[in-house]
Amino acid sequence: MAKGFFLNAEVIFYGELLKMKFSTIGLSESEHALMKNAQRDYEDVFINAEELVRLSYEFLISIDPERWIFVSLLYQFQKFLSLSLLSTIRRHGVQTNMMLRQTLEFGCLSIYGLFIMDPIL
């Protein structure tokens, strides 16, 4: 019996048949192992990416309440940036690219939101 990487499933070979047993606990454990090993596997790239995500949450000191559009769009930027880092660590290439695209879009929109105070105009 061999352990497969995919969903940390148990792979049992019976001749040419392949059976996989799904395990939520196994999935969680494999995801946790990827997160624990990310710094070792990706070294400076991971550290820089993690610091960028942290900076996106901590760079604001205060914000004018009239700039609520900026804040709501910035939240989306932060969320997608965090998700893109997690997707990269989990080796989900397509999802990573989708999250990075959303990150860029909401980054541009949030900057635009700095200058728009009344969405009706």
Image (cartoon, grey):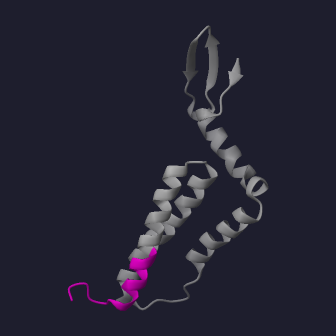
Q: Residue at x 75, y 50 (%)?
A: 37
Image quadrant where residue 121 sits: bottom left
The answer to which quarter of the image holds residue 108 is: bottom left
Quadrant of the rendered image containing residue 49: bottom right
Q: Position of residue 39 (x, y in %)?
A: 75, 57
What residue is drawn where x is 37% and y is 91%? 115
Q: Is residue 117 magenta?
A: yes
What residue span does the magenta drawing correspond to? 107-121
Whether 96 is drawn above or below 109: the answer is: above
In the displayed structure, would residue 23 be above or below residue 94? above
Q: Is residue 90 left or right of residue 106?
A: right
Q: Residue at x 42, y 72 (%)?
A: 106
The quadrant of the rendering that contains the N terminus is: top right
Q: Main secondary structure of the magenta part?
A: helix
Residue 14 on the magenta span: no
Residue 31 % position (x, y)? 63, 44
Front one among 48 and 58:
48
Q: Residue furthest left?
A: 120
Asked whether the viewer can see residue 71, the reply is no
Q: Is residue 121 visible?
A: yes
